[in-house]
Image: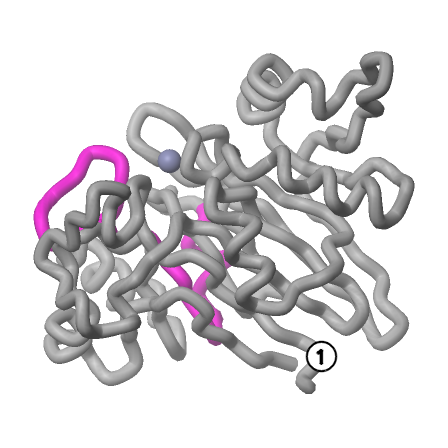
Amino acid sequence: MMSKKFTILGSGSSLGVPRIDGNFGKCNPRDKKNYRTRCCAHLQFNEISILIDTSPDLRFQLLRNNIKDVNCVLYTHAHADQTHGINDLRAFYIKYRKRLNIYADNSTKKHLMSSFGYCFKNKPGYPAILKMNILKKKIIFNSKKGNLLIEPIMTQHGHIKAASYLINKKIFYGSDVSKIYNKDFKRIHKLDYFIIDCLRYEYHPSHYNLDEVLNLIKVIRPKKTILTNLHSSVDYSKLKKILPKNVTPAYDGIKILFN
Ligand SMILES: [Zn+2]
């Protein structure tokens, strides 16, 4: 087993594919790559296991990917499709007898503390399961075999800001983005992997669409690009056919092995 691995646990937009009522939109139900849970990701760096977001599908996602340990959670933003699996983190409190560290920016912190206060404050019979940390410019994890550097890059996501994450300056993960600010381009011009929100073909105020992403790639020039947060109007193989060679749609469970 490789010891450095990035996994896209969920590649679907807010309602997933199919939706709860069985609606597949324009996706072919016979293609397994069209079955999409909500956006969430996992980073394994030697012995360190990091989750990005806690989607409503979190329990299913960890079971399916055989992820049995989580050391901390980084949040991108407070929307329901990235946070509503938070309660399932209780399993790790029970396992380690210790609060799990989570990282969030100020506005995400506020939302999480008010919506899920019971996760952060002790109540009789229900100990707090999480410890809130404010996102810093750089988060460094020391593993036995080298260091991991994670840098949040705040990006526009419609009316709010969402954190995208730059991992060892080589992998960019931005699942909910409508704009990367020009000032940040120089930080992401030598990427091995650019994992980016590409909701659908048509314009959307809170997410990049396909044309916008293809233009962005011409500027940033990453070695490889993976499109995520895919809406039910986007069929995997139909999209793949029209993409440049080094660009691919994500599917649930797609993995990147890196050094
Ligand atoms: Zn969102």
> As drawn, is 141 to the left or to the right of 178?
right
Residue 200, given in percent of the width and then of the height, sits at: 17, 52
Q: Position of residue 85 (x, y in %)?
A: 54, 39
Give the quadrant of the N terminus. bottom right
Given the image, on which type of amino acid does mark 1 rest?
Ser
Query: Which stretch appears magenta?
Result: 184-208
Dot 1 crowding, Cα within 10 Å, few <14, some 14–19, many 20+: some
| Nearer to me, 97 or 247 | 97
Is 14 one of the magenta-colored residues? Answer: no
Q: Is residue 126 placed above or below 241 in the rendered structure? A: above
Picture coordinates of residue 249, whole percent (x, y): 28, 69
Q: Which quadrant of the render holds ligand 1? A: top left
Q: Is residue 102 left or right of residue 255?
A: right
What secondary structure predominates along the stretch shown in magenta? Answer: loop
Q: Is residue 254 visible?
A: yes
Which quadrant of the structure image shows residue 10? bottom left
Looking at the rendered structure, the secondary structure element under dot 1 is: loop
Residue at the image position 20 percent from the left and 79 percent from the top: 244
Q: Would you name the residue on which mark 1 appears?
A: 3
**143, 44: nearer the viewer:** 44
